[in-house]
Amino acid sequence: MSFKGVLVKAVAIEEKLKADLAKVATDVDGAVVKLEADAPEIEAVADAVVPGASTYVNLGLTLLEGVADVLDKGDAAAEQNLKNAGLDEALIAAVKAQIANIKKLV
């Protein structure tokens, strides 16, 4: 195979890959919409297995977002206030490490 043939093949593979990625992105968007639509049923199943599970998950997410917000917008004093309130330093460090990911979710 010539150098030109290798380039042509590489371009064809790249174009197929782009098309496949676009399809995957569309499929993911559709799945997210489906999951959002099915959320009440999913929560009901979770609650049937562990009573109150959906409430605990939602409460946990709300707390996580709140702590992340305090750490993101606050200063060292805000972090110290969380420690003084009894939050574990390792937990605070874990939340700080995930602030960027949490912002993507909310």
Image: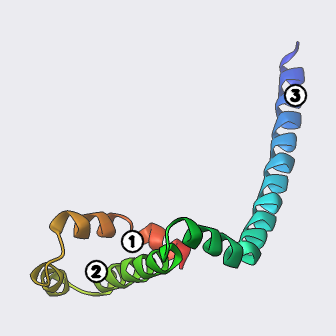
Q: Is residue 97 left or right of residue 47?
A: left
Question: For the residue carrying disc 3, how many other residues have a C-alpha within 10 Å: few (<14), some (14-19), or many (20+)?
Answer: few
| Residue named by callout 1 | 99
**The disc labelled 1 sits on which kind of residue?**
Ile
Question: For the residue carrying disc 1, how many other residues have a C-alpha within 10 Å: few (<14), some (14-19), or many (20+)?
Answer: some
Residue 34 location, x and y as percent? 78, 70
The residue located at (55%, 65%) in the rendering is: 49
Residue 63 location, x and y as percent? 37, 81
Answer above or below: position of 51 versus 6.
below
The residue located at (78%, 50%) in the rendering is: 21
Q: Nearer the viewer, mark 3 or mark 2?
A: 2
The circle on residue 71 is 2
**The disc labelled 3 sits on which kind of residue?**
Lys
Residue 81 location, x and y as percent? 14, 86
- In the figure, residue 79 lies in which quadrant? bottom left
Gap between marks 1 and 2 measured at Cα: 8 Å
| Residue named by callout 3 | 9
Q: Nearer the viewer, mark 1 or mark 3?
A: 1
Answer above or below: position of 9 versus 33.
above
Q: Is residue 62 left or right of residue 48?
A: left
Q: Are marks 1 and 2 in contact (CB under 8 Å)?
A: yes
